Image (tube, helix red, strand yellow):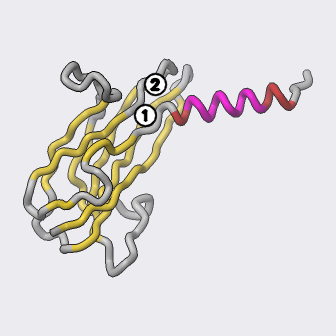
Amino acid sequence: MKFSFATTLASLLLATTTVLSQTIAIGYPQDGASVTPGSNITVEVDRPDTLSGSQEVAVVIGINSCRNTTCIPPDEILGSILYDGGYNPQFTSNAPFKPPHQNFTVTIPSFLAKGRAQLAVFHVSLIGAGFAPFTEIKNITVNVQ
């Protein structure tokens, strides 16, 4: 059986589109936002609507101070864990133009050093007809005051 270049390319594009449609985004706070140690903030985790099969498993939200001018990549260390548990993004009637999302109220650790920090979300889901595992990490930089 011979596969043409076009068939192979179409299969790769479909697989890429399926994975990209399952990706999350940090909807809030915005990149560069200021946070205060000891305060509660809302972290909104968005997932674009999709027609492909997926099952959400969990998210882990962490924050890690940046030392000097360098932030350690979140795939190496998440830092202080602010939330770990289920993720069930939904449309909300009071925000009809938002994608499915879930809000998490978390407490910024009181011991967090002032300066830049990375807020990261580690996402786990199962995608496709056979439910293949899918993981990703998204992050933003916040200013700790």
Q: Quadrant of residue 28?
A: top left
Mark 1 belongs to which amino acid? Ser
Label 2 sits on a secondary structure element that is: strand
* Residue range of the region highlighted in magenta in the rendering: 9-18
Where is mark 1, residue-wise?
125
Q: How many marks?
A: 2
Q: Position of residue 24 (x, y in %)?
A: 40, 39
Which label sits on residue 47? none
Residue lying farthest right? 2
Q: Position of residue 114 (x, y in %)?
A: 19, 73
Q: Residues within 10 Å of mark 2 (few under 14, many from 20)?
A: many
Q: Quadrant of residue 55?
A: top left
Residue lying farthest front? 97
Q: Residue at x 55, y 20 (%)?
A: 129
Direction from residue 126 to residue 37 in the image, left or right = left
Q: Position of residue 81 (x, y in %)?
A: 24, 55
Q: Residue at x 18, y 45 (%)?
A: 42
Disc 2 and disc 1 in contact, CB within 8 angstroms: yes
Direction from residue 30 to residue 5 in the image, left or right = right
Q: Position of residue 39 (x, y in %)?
A: 8, 56
**For marks 2 and 1 on the same chain, the one whose residue lies earlier in the sequence:** 2
From the viewer's perspective, is residue 34 above or below residue 45?
Answer: below
Where is mark 2, residue-wise?
54
